[in-house]
Image (cartoon, grey):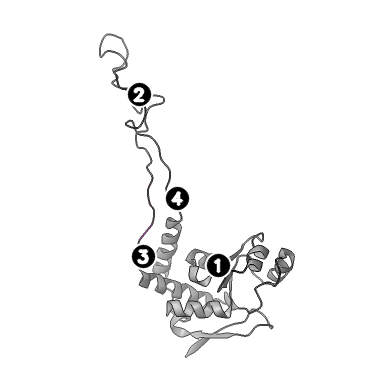
Amino acid sequence: MGLQIPALNDKDSSVEVAETVFGQSFNETLVHQLVVRYMAGARAGTKAQKTRSDVSGGGSKPWRQKGTGRARSGTIRSPIWRTGGVAFAARPRNYEQKLNKKMFRVGVRSILSELLRQNRLVVSNDIIPTSVKTKAFNEKIKSIDAKRILIVVEEVTANLALASRNIPYVNVIEAVNLNPVLLVSADKVIATPGALKQLEGRLV
């Protein structure tokens, strides 16, 4: 038994998909974990500061221990000195979180199923532009009652990439590179029939 993905407009026709992929219950905990994992993996983690051992200089004691009237000090690299090291210095780190393939598939199926229930997932044969003109493609997008639009295709063509790249709140992605963060944040997800079949094959 299958489910019908509704068509974007009268020019398109609905597509039947597997209920095992697009008819799952919404697992909020897993979806949250999946989204956090993707956002964490996008962090650069390249921030770095110097500790007292990294700062140059400071090989000798600045002044003798007693008799100067000043507080004792052993090195000019101390964190309390100007140009000294940082007490708790930031270090390059990897923010990636582990999530196995089975959890990923279940999480994405849960997102797609919820999008379909909320009428935010539609199919279109006519969404890929025939030219690189942004104006013509933008007119087509304006007719869609949504602010943030995600277009899922089998392959991003040159026409689609050039026509959509300067339109705000419109993202284009291939089915094999599906991003859960873009799925969750989109008001409307428009997929081609081929992209839906690719998703169905990967997530079944």
Q: Amino acid at mark 4?
A: Ala
Q: Which residue is mark 3?
A: 99
Counting other residues with Cα less than 10 Å from the Cα at mark 3, is it few (<14), some (14-19), or many (20 or more)?
A: few
Gap in Å between the C-alphas at discs 1 and 3? 22 Å
Counting other residues with Cα less than 10 Å from the Cα at mark 4, is it few (<14), some (14-19), or many (20 or more)?
A: few
Indicate which label's residue lies in the foreground, 1 or 3: 1
Disc with the residue nearer the chain's start (2 vs 4) = 4
Q: Which residue is mark 2?
A: 57
The residue at the point 37 percent across, 33 percent down is: 86
- Element class at badge 3: loop
Residue 21 image position (x, y, % from top left): 45, 80
Indicate which label's residue lies in the foreground, 2 or 4: 2
Q: Which residue is mark 4?
A: 44
- Element class at badge 2: loop
Gap in Å between the C-alphas at discs 2 and 4? 31 Å
Q: Which residue is mark 1?
A: 173
User: Residues in magenta?
Assistant: 93-99
Gap in Å between the C-alphas at discs 2 and 3? 45 Å
Using the rendered view, name the quadrant where residue 191 is placed.
Answer: bottom right
- Element class at badge 4: loop
Disc with the residue nearer the chain's start (2 vs 1) = 2
Q: Amino acid at mark 3?
A: Leu
